[in-house]
Amino acid sequence: MATALLLGTKLRLVFEAGMDDEGNPLYKAKTFSNVKKEATVDQLYQAAHAISVLCKDTLNKVERNDSTEILA
């Protein structure tokens, strides 16, 4: 039976950075590495919003990216 080993977690914040010439939104992202693997969804959400207060752009999306190794 295969098992999964969580190697690392990253937090990615996507900001709305304005509009292009056609009126479509432009996005930019900032990724934070070395996030504690044990961090809960609520903790990551609170951290993302605390960081977004320091930014001029509007927070659009918060993503958690986990890296997992599958072992046989």
Image (cartoon, rainbow, N blue to C red):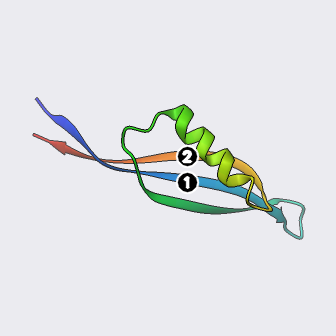
- Helix, strand or loop under label 2: strand
- Helix, strand or loop under label 1: strand
Residue at 49% in and 45% down:
64
Residue 38 locus on image (x, y percent): 37, 38
Of all residues shown, which one is farthest toward the top? 1
Q: Amino acid at mark 2?
A: Glu
* The N terminus lies in quadrant: top left
Residue at 55% in and 46% down:
63
Vertical placement of residue 51 versus 45, above or below = below
Badge 2 crowding class, 10 Å Cα cut-off, few under 14, some 14 to 19, many 20 or more, is some
Residue 39 locus on image (x, y percent): 44, 38
Q: Amino acid at mark 1?
A: Arg
Vertical placement of residue 63 versus 26, above or below = above
Q: CA distance from mark 2 to mark 1?
A: 5 Å
Badge 1 crowding class, 10 Å Cα cut-off, few under 14, some 14 to 19, many 20 or more, is some
Residue receiving disc 1: 12
Residue receiving disc 2: 63
Contact (CB < 8 A) between labels 2 and 1? yes
Residue at 51% in and 51% down:
11
* The C terminus lies in quadrant: top left
Mark yes or no: residue 50 visible.
Answer: yes
Is 53 in front, or is 16?
A: 53
Is 8 in front, or is 16?
A: 8
Mark yes or no: residue 61 visible.
Answer: no
Residue 37 locus on image (x, y percent): 36, 43
Q: Quadrant of residue 28 in the image?
A: bottom right
Residue at 53% in and 60% down:
31
Vertical placement of residue 22 versus 2, above or below = below
